[in-house]
Image (cartoon, rainbow, N blue to C red):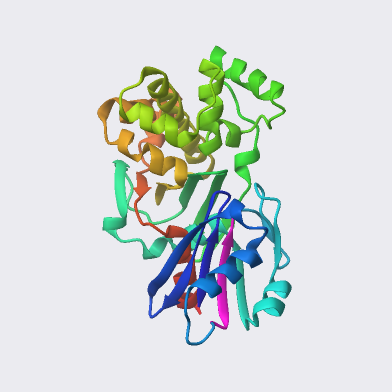
Amino acid sequence: MLVADIGGTNSRIGILKDREFLNIKVYPSKEHQNVYSIIERYFSEVFLENLPEKVYLAVAGPVFEDKAKLTNLGWEVSVKELKKKFNFKEVFLVNDLYGLALGSSFLSNKDLKTLKKGKTKKKFPRVFLAPGTGLGISVLIDEGIVLPSENGHTPFCPLKKEEYAFLEYLGTLNEEKCWEKALSGKAVSLWYQFYFNQTLSPEEIFNLAKKGEEKALKTVETMVELLGRKASELALTFLPEGGIYLTGGLVSGLKEFLTKKNFLDKFLTGYFNNPKMDFLLERFPIKLIAHPYPVLLGALAILHNR
């Protein structure tokens, strides 16, 4: 089976054979015109004795009626076109966070790092929070039952003066005043720009923060606290006794900081921002996903469930 995770920044594509992922390649998504050209490039670069007849395609956007639109790329893709172009016999077209949730049962203990222990031993529901190019969120209600969402596009609710000012700043840039613009890879740059009137990439900001540069550290602190706050919002919405799972490009960038007490405390400050509900928020474990290709695990789940 051909497996692909098509994100707003990077696309990961490879082959699933005997429960192993082989020949994984990572391509910058914006170097391509559409999903089809990424698949064509992969087939041109990787020698395969037989072209796969099945494809699992997880995309960063909503999927309805065998069609998907990738929110931050504007691309469209359809099951019908995939079959026509590549002679696939079976196409599993899913939202990337749907695939992530579906495949989470295949995560082992070594694939997970606990940020906060919980007080429940239940397996479900589980919430998945994946800020990357966008802000992906899904819920695993029970084994094989996933609720995808576009919750990242809900309005961002400011709680501090500087957050109100940040919303106004987004307005001056004609940016959507939503959670995705406050908590994502792009949001790292937007907050830095808002604070210091300088434009840097998220990678540059993280590198400066690792060197102890104060402006970058302030931006990272903001992201960490907002990550905790969004996790709290989802915890109170879905009561995820199976845990809250964090992944995505932004989480990868923050991972090193979350191992340090002051940043972890900032994250937990964001999470426990409603003292009245502490007794409930304490119940839910929070885990960071360390697996390199967690979205692709959805393909394993699909085959297993069949």
Question: Residue 171: horizontal and vertical position, in percent?
Answer: 70, 23
In this rendering, is residue 296 above or below 162?
below
Report the front residue among 17 and 36.
Answer: 36
The answer to whether residue 148 shows anywhere in this view is no
In this rendering, is residue 301 above or below 182?
below
Q: Most extreme residue toward the front, as rendered?
A: 45
In this rendering, is residue 148 above or below 42?
above
Q: Is residue 292 magenta?
A: no
Report the front residue among 95 and 202.
Answer: 202
The answer to whether residue 284 shows anywhere in this view is yes
Kindly identify the residue that appears in the image at 35 percent across and 21 percent down: 213
In this rendering, is residue 225 above or below 22?
above
Quadrant position of residue 209? top left
- Horizontal arrangement in the rendering, residue 292 relative to residue 295 (left or right): left
Kindly identify the residue that appears in the image at 51 percent across and 70 percent down: 3
Q: Main secondary structure of the magenta part?
A: strand
Kindly identify the residue that appears in the image at 38 percent across and 76 percent down: 19
Q: Most extreme residue toward the top, as rendered?
A: 161
Question: Residue 155: horizontal and vertical position, in percent?
Answer: 65, 32
Question: Residue 223: horizontal and vertical position, in percent?
Answer: 45, 29
Quadrant position of residue 207? top left
Q: Is residue 55 magenta?
A: yes
Residue stretch rendered in magenta on the structure: 52-59
Question: Residue 138: horizontal and vertical position, in percent?
Answer: 54, 51
